[in-house]
Amino acid sequence: MTIHFSGLRVRRGMDDAYELVRKLPDAETFCELREAAGMSPRSVEGARAGLPNTVFGVSVRRDGETVGMARIVGDRGTVYQIADMAVRPAHQGRGLGTAMMDELVAYLDREAPPNAYVNLFADVDGFYERWGFEPTAPASRGMYRRTD
């Protein structure tokens, strides 16, 4: 795969051409991509309100279609959360998630102040550990509450 990023080409070992950009898709594409990747739905209204508050985000495109996205949300100082990591099923297993995480972690390494807390919720094992993420349990546990 060849990934184009800000005019640079990075060879990743396959022939398919992808473009990695520092931009998120529009709200409608964001919601559709989450569902296509098997993630819980979000409302378009919520996405329109929330996406402009993204700290940093990336998308992967191929032939004009957004096939992947990931972003960081937070307060830009003490807390950051990696969120909305999604890749369309037909494009999974090609290193796109790795390329997006590399960009997110590079941003955090450059911009986050010392001792910032970076978290994420994920339903996959063995992927995020390579960037230093580890389970919080039993020291702490994640919780959530969804609005109606």
Image: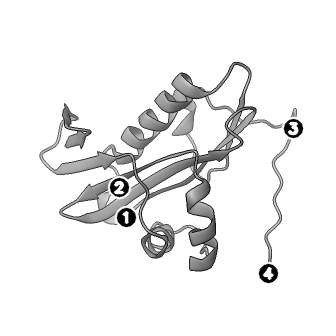
The numbered disc on residue 49 is none
User: The C terminus is located in which quarter?
Assistant: bottom right
* Residue located 37% across and 64% down the image: 89
Q: Which of pointers 4 and 3 lies earlier in the amino acid sequence?
A: 3
Q: Which of pointers 2 and 4 lies earlier in the amino acid sequence?
A: 2
Residues marked 1 and 2 touching at CB (< 8 Å): yes
Q: Which of pointers 3 and 1 lies earlier in the amino acid sequence?
A: 1
The kind of residue on which mark 1 rests is Pro
The kind of residue on which mark 3 rests is Ser
Q: Look at the numbered disc 4 and give the secondary structure of its residue.
A: loop
Left or right for 113, reference 26: right
* Residue located 56% across and 67% down the image: 39
User: In terms of depth relative to the viewer, which is nearer, 135 or 78?
Assistant: 78
Q: Look at the numbered disc 3 and give the secondary structure of its residue.
A: loop
User: In terms of depth relative to the viewer, which is nearer, 15 or 75?
Assistant: 75
Q: Is disc 3 surrounded by few (<14), some (14 to 19) or many (20+) residues within 10 Å?
A: few
- Residue 145, x across and y down, in percent: 83, 65
The numbered disc on residue 89 is 1
User: Separation of disc 2 and disc 3 at Cα?
Assistant: 31 Å
Q: Which residue is mark 3?
A: 140
Q: Which residue is mark 4?
A: 148
User: Separation of disc 3 and disc 1 at Cα?
Assistant: 32 Å
User: Separation of disc 4 and disc 1 at Cα?
Assistant: 28 Å
Q: Which residue is mark 2?
A: 92
Q: Nearer the viewer, mark 4 or mark 1?
A: 4
Quadrant of the image occupied by residue 65: bottom left
Which residue is farthest bottom? 148
